[in-house]
Image (cartoon, helix red, strand yellow):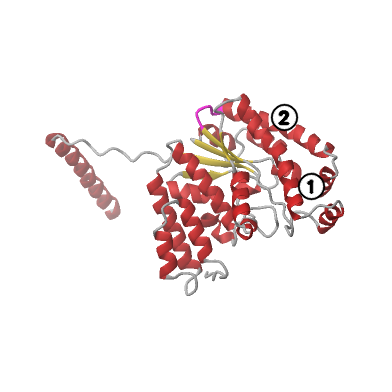
Amino acid sequence: MRFRKTLAILLTVAFVAVIGTAIALQTSGEKEPSPEPEPLLITFWGDSIAEGVLGPSPLKERDSYAYFAIVGRDNGYKYVNRSVSGHQTSHMLEYIRRPDENAYLTDTLMRTSDIIHISILGNDLLQNSLGAMVVNYAKGNSSSLDANIAKARINFAEIMDHILSVNPDAFVMINTVYNPMFEGSAILPQSCIDEMHALGMDSADIRNTGSAMLAELNGIIFDYLAEHEGAYVVIDAEAEFDRIFSEDEERGKGLFYKDGVHPSNEGHAVIADLIQRALEKEGLAGEATALANYKQLRTEQLARLYAGTADTAENRARISGAASVEEVTYAYFRAIEGYSPVYYG
């Protein structure tokens, strides 16, 4: 009983205070403070690259290394990841067509997103005897590649048609599939490498074979966009990974996780930087705010994971003085090269 009386008194006091504040604001001519705007909702869809479960290492650092989380945190968005490892275009198409079945609210999220990011297509080759497909392509037989691309093209068009019909106002971004093929990569078994060597191919030829195949796969993205101008913005991960690989091969190889398929921590950061630039160009992100937040994210990681090693005044100063998110990425990953993180808890 005493609790109820006390609660009633507190509520009365609070009510009077609110009314008094409102009257005071009206009397003084001041406007009531506007409510904080709702953060933009960005959702991520597609495969394991977007899901960020494989690649970011260790997994407990996923919210600091996976590109979906970096983009979400840097910009203060509400971010939700609905990507599913292993999804090919056929799986994604079926997935996004489902009505809401549970708390995942897949359909609602697709319809209400302000920003939609997609990573898809890679598994349409990867899960269909990629090794044999690459060797046959190198021999001049592209029948398997052509068949898989034909199916993926149809599915991709239906995916985009669905998204544009249920959420025509969203800003949509789509990653190209990067080239993970190089001598020593885990993506191809040694037997395939040996067969390609037997054909007279060297390391450059092997990488160029991957580029040629991906030109056809990524052509699906560019062809749809040519027919549906403005449908989405291309996040050209392939071009950026290739640029880095050509300028610094060791850094380029380091963009891949040890399985040879997924982006490494730095690979995710490079993709996040590309997405950031697209958002800023569209006016959906503030460059200065995102840069400040990214510097803080990386500085905190240095302190959390590399105390006593890479967490030095010099490295913190490089990150602090960076003029762009790309420079922060470069400074952070060069700082931690050769050091093993120390995990607590």
Q: Report the amino acid beneath label 1.
A: Leu
Q: Is residue 75 visible?
A: yes
Which of the two discs, 1 and 2, labels the residue nearer the N terminus? 1
Depicted 60 relative to depicted 282: above or below: below
The residue at 73%/42% (across/down) is 212
- Residue at the (63%, 60%) spot, across then down: 250
Instruction: Name the disc covering residue 154, or none.
Output: 2
| Whether residue 98 can be seen here | no
Kindly identify the residue that appears in the image at 44 percent across and 51 percent down: 324
Q: Amino acid at mark 2?
A: Ile
The correct choice, above or below, for 313 with respect to 257 in the image is below
Magenta span: chief secondary structure: loop
**In the rendered image, the vertical position of residue 72 relative to residue 23, given as above or below:** below
Give residue 169's position: percent from left, percent from top.
50, 28
Determine the image quadrant of residue 255. bottom right
Which residue carries the number 1 mark?
Answer: 130
Left or right: where does residue 216 sit relative to residue 341? right
Q: Horizontally, is 20 left or right of 286 in the view?
A: left
The quadrant holding residue 109 is top right
Element type at mark 2? helix
Bounds of the magenta span? 166-170
Q: Residues within 10 Å of mark 2 (few under 14, many from 20)?
A: few
Q: Going by the image, does 214 lie left or right of 336?
A: right
